[in-house]
């Protein structure tokens, strides 16, 4: 290359340098200092910030793979809104196979699960509302006895109860229940513990629904002196509905905890039978489960009642605002049914989500999904893709429902207790995420100058207290609020 060509090349690069710098924005010194001076400076940090035009304002490790934790729900919920539409509803049907003879139904009652995750107190004043509807229906027909079985059909979903990668010690708790096409009360019993007046005694317990013997509690808890700390210890013996309680509670302490059950469809019809009997309708037959997707046929049944769920937009509101794993995974399996017209599975549901990600600009060659909710530590995406996604979906017709589903910092949901003493209180709309060693925060920040920023802040592999990581995240948001 001669000298004149070298000079022209140098001049061209010099003229293009401002554009190159803009295209490859780096993290500001202020944010870099916040991270480097923090107790979590040796963790892996990823920060991406864009303005409403898509211009990249801040970038630290944006193109590296991160574990998103529950920030993954921002993507899954978008996929569900895109696939089903905000007004989509589920139908849970009650059938009869037999006939009414006097005050008896001679034959079976059959309940067809549709994958509805909303049959719970999250969406209705009374979690037992559906059973009450069916009692009123039978009562209106003059039926006081069921001379047959109660059958649950849960074959719309496969029999794999959990996504791959969920940790075994989470499976006792409400945030990691079994996923089943026929589910009631989020597949949990709700335990109440009342620590009495005598130190050293065993606390009193009760649980919803109506202290059901479907679960067995082994109560080894102890009341401790006033002023001591509450130490929580609950463990469901895997493969059973036996739950061991070993908490210590200070005198006078009151504790509630939703705990998961095994075989949710059996839990559903067991609760229904007990509700029938409490309402004066006896059941002489057995409880049976039908999980055969290929032989289920309702042609010979009489349709007695169809329950239509709340619309999807209400489910997505709870999914994002409260970071609900159960709803997310139920919708993922139902998405597989909708797209492939086969028995719903997590893997097929993740294919649906991955295809949606591709249409919204994700590099799906750099995506690894084990679940739809973000609980599995093996989930991997790029922070830059997630951040761009937050801008991309604003053109979608369903975006207003998505936006309303986000938690508001300092106001509600999983962000309700955060940012209250910050200047941007009430101005951040988004989603937090947490699994062991992972803290994430993504959403929209309305700045002091009136700009709206798409913000993604993710910390992986930290060993300090999560509260300290949260503090750094909040300082970054405050810097963005005042300086962009």
Image (tube, rainbow, N blue to C red):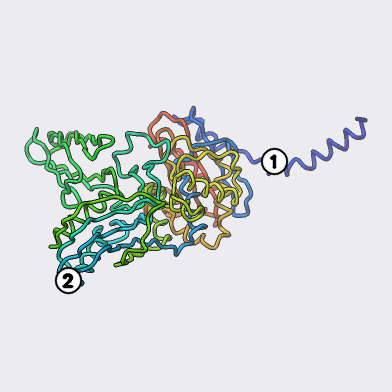
* Picture quadrant where residue 173 is located: top left
Whether residue 423 appears in this view of the structure is no
Say which residue label 1 marks. Answer: 21
In the shown orientation, is residue 427 left or right of residue 264?
right
- Badge 2: few (under 14), some or many (20 or more) residues near its Cα, within 10 Å? some
In the shown orientation, is residue 193 left or right of residue 28?
left
What kind of element bears circle 1? helix
Query: Which residue is depicted at the point 41% across and 28% down?
Result: 463
Horizontal and vertical percent for residue 357?
56, 48
Horizontal and vertical percent for residue 204?
11, 42
Horizontal and vertical percent for residue 159?
37, 44
**Which of the two marks, 2 or 1, is nearer to us in this view?**
2
Query: Which residue is depicted at the point 59% across and 51% down?
Result: 360
Whether residue 212 appears in this view of the structure is yes
- Badge 1: few (under 14), some or many (20 or more) residues near its Cα, within 10 Å? few
Q: Which of 401 and 378 is in front in this view?
A: 378
What kind of element bears circle 2? loop
Q: Nearer the viewer, residue 91 or 425?
A: 91
CA separation in Å, label 2 and label 1: 78 Å
In the shown orientation, is residue 157 left or right of residue 196?
right
Q: Which of 132 and 61 is in front in this view?
A: 132
Horizontal and vertical percent for residue 469?
43, 36
Q: Which mark is residue 365?
A: none
Q: In terms of sequence position, does the residue under pointer 2 or pointer 1 come before the other?
A: 1
Query: Which residue is depicted at the point 26% across and 46% down?
Result: 258
From this view, report whether residue 206 is shown above or below residue 168.
below
Say which residue label 2 marks. Answer: 142
Q: Which of 371 and 297 is in front in this view?
A: 297
Query: CB under 8 Å between callouts 2 and 1?
Result: no
From this view, report whether residue 73 is shown above or below residue 28.
below
């Amino acid at each position: 290359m001669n000298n004149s060509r070298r000079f022209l090349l140098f001049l061209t690069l010099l003229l293009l340098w401002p554009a190159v710098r803009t295209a490859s924005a780096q993290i500001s010194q202020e944010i870099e200092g916040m991270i480097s001076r923090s107790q979590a400076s040796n963790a892996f940090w990823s920060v991406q910030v864009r303005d409403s035009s898509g211009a990249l304002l801040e970038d630290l490790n944006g193109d590296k793979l991160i574990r998103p934790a529950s920030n993954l729900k921002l993507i899954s919920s978008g996929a569900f809104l895109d696939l089903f539409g905000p007004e989509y509803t589920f139908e849970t049907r009650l059938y009869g196979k037999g006939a009414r003879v006097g005050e008896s139904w001679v034959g079976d009652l059959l309940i067809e699960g549709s994958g509805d995750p909303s049959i719970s107190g999250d969406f209705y004043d009374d979690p037992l509302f559906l059973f009450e509807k069916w009692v009123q229906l039978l009562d209106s027909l003059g039926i006081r006895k069921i001379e047959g079985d109660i059958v649950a059909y849960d074959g719309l979903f496969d029999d794999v109860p959990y996504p791959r990668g969920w940790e075994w010690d989470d499976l006792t708790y409400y945030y990691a229940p079994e996923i089943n096409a026929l589910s009631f009360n989020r597949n949990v019993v709700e335990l109440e513990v009342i620590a009495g007046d005598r130190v050293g005694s065993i606390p009193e317990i009760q649980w919803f629904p109506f202290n059901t013997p479907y679960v067995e509690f082994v109560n080894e808890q102890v009341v401790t002196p006033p002023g001591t700390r509450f130490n929580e210890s609950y463990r469901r013996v895997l493969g059973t509905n036996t739950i061991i309680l070993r908490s210590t509670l200070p005198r006078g302490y009151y504790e509630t905890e939703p705990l998961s059950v095994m075989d949710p469809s059996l839990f559903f019809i067991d609760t229904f039978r007990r509700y029938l009997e409490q309402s004066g309708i006896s059941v002489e037959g057995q409880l049976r489960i039908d999980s055969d997707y290929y032989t289920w046929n309702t042609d010979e049944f009489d349709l007695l009642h169809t329950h239509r769920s709340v619309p999807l937009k209400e489910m997505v509101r709870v999914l994002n605002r409260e970071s609900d794993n159960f709803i997310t995974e139920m919708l993922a399996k139902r998405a597989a049914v909708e797209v492939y017209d086969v028995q719903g599975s997590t893997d097929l549901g993740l294919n649906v989500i991955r295809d949606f990600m591709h249409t919204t600009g994700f590099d799906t060659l750099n995506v690894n999904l084990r679940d739809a909710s973000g609980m599995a530590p093996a989930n991997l995406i790029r922070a830059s893709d997630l951040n761009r996604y937050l801008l991309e979906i604003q053109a979608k017709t369903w975006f207003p429902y998505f936006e309303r589903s986000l938690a508001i910092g300092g106001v509600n949901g999983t962000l309700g207790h955060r940012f209250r003493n910050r200047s941007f209180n009430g101005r951040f709309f988004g989603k937090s995420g947490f699994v062991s060693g992972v803290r994430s925060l993504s959403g929209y920040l309305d700045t002091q100058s009136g700009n709206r920023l798409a913000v993604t802040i993710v910390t992986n592999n930290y060993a300090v207290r999560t509260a300290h990581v949260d503090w750094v995240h909040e300082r970054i948001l405050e810097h963005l609020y005042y300086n962009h």
